[in-house]
Amino acid sequence: MTHHVVVVGAGFAGLQLVKGLAGAGCRVTLIDQRNHHLFQPLLYQVATTLLSTSEIAWPIRRVLRNRPDVTTLLARVTGVDRVTQRVTLENGTTVSYDTLVLATGARHAYFGHDEWEADAPGLKTLEDATTIRRRLLLAFERAEIASDPAERDANLTFAIIGGGPTGVELAGIVADLAHRVLPREFRAIDTRTARIMLIEAGPRLLSVFAPKLSDYAAAALERRGVQVLTGRPVTQVSRDQVVIGDQPVPCRTVIWAAGVQASPAANWLGAEADRAGRVMVNAHLTLPDDPQVFVLGDTAHVETDGKPVPGLAPAAKQQGQYAASVIRARLAGKPLPAPFRYVHRGNLATIGRNAAVIDYGRFRLTGGLAWWIWGIAHIYFLIGVRSRLAVGINWLWSFLSRQNPARLITQKETGRRG
């Protein structure tokens, strides 16, 4: 029988692996709980009204329509039986495998305060992005009609928790929205008075970047009107306020960008995991005691030069390509490739209009040129000519007109607010 590879997760790692198995002579089943592949690095731009959902997500079936060797299933996995080599789906059916690849990504981590999630949504899915976008836009609308000055100020206060790339990028665009895009559209309020706080428990923003770049990012955000609070942990979040240390701040919009934890894959496998829930894998990205099971991307703990591989899209893609090469070698009866080694190609983060930071080791860049390089790099990695053109045109229009095109308040939120 034809060797059957089951891949769970159509993110960067899973999709790259499926592409790498083209022509390998095996049968592939790709399972995901959503019907689309998502370009997560630009998800925050959906949340902050720069892009629409269709510009950073693509139906999986469309992406793989020319691959008759691939079957796509829209389903949620609930367990794995390694003895019988079967994956269990939420509806009770099972899918057998010869090789299993788990690339199920990560979810938000609230450090023991899961009750904060309803009032401080994170940013991992399209649903998260549209929820945040809705809350941002409604905050300005509610401030416009508020008769109580305190209520108005609370609606115009935005707290972003976490000073990594996502938090910095969110803060920069929210500031641009309040200071550049919206001022001429409201009558009762001045959106430029909005208080935008970026709160980081650690000593500096962008801790994976060089300290000088962190300092540049903080200064650039402050010039845009963002209040940067470092060394200040958040101790409480509710629908009415955020408590920073022991200081309560009335606030109606909180966004979580502080931490992630791996999917439940380690529990499915009964495998060893690190503190973040990532499965410990060997240098071939498989379980130490089960070479038929690969774990990739944010779900896996793998090291290069004694350091954990970061949870970045390039790292996930490299792992997907490597795992495909291992499977191909096994199917062809050839020696396995050398152990996986992550090649780090640098860190990039945008701070807002015409400002970004790039850290390529010895090569470091800030400012407008870095912003253009950041944009070109992200457009290059988008899937399909149509998406590249759409994003490029939207960015150019936003840059020239100082308008954000995706500002519709549409579907009703299923969380704490209507």
Image (cartoon, rainbow, N blue to C red):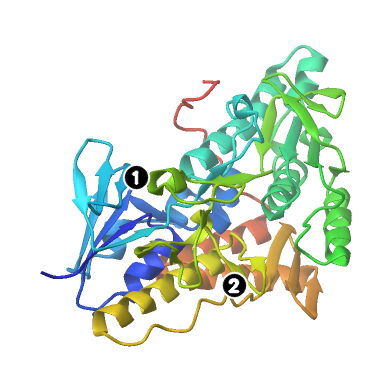
Lateral position of residue 291 relative to residue 132, left or right: left
Contact flag, marks 2 and 1 (Cβ < 8 Å): no
Image quarter of residue 238? top right
Let me know if residue 399 appears in the view. yes
Whether residue 371 is situated above or below residue 91 in the rendered picture: below
Mark 2 falls on what kind of element?
helix
Q: Nearer the viewer, residue 359 or 275?
A: 275
Q: Is residue 37 above or below residue 209?
A: above
Q: Amino acid at mark 1?
A: Gln
Which type of secondary structure does the marked residue at label 1 adopt? Answer: loop
Q: Give residue 182's position: percent from left, percent from top.
A: 70, 40
- Looking at the image, residue 365 sits to the left or right of residue 56; the answer is right
Residue at left offset 50%, top offset 65%? 316
The image quarter containing residue 326 is bottom left
Q: Which mark is residue 377?
A: 2
Q: Nearer the viewer, residue 197 or 148?
A: 197
Q: For the N terminus, which image quadrant? A: bottom left
Assess disc 1: are there few (<14), some (14-19) or many (≥20) residues with their C-alpha within 10 Å of its C-alpha. Answer: some
Judge by depth and name the residue closer to the eye, 309 or 180. Answer: 309
> Quick check: 247 left or right of 312?
right
Disc 2 marks a residue whose amino acid type is Ala
Q: Which mark is residue 290?
A: none
Visible residue check, residue 188: no
Residue 234 location in percent, x, y?
78, 32
On residue 33, the disc is: 1
What residue lies at 87% left-to-right and 42% top-to-bottom? 231
Q: Position of residue 71 (x, y in %)?
A: 20, 59
Outermost bottom residue: 334
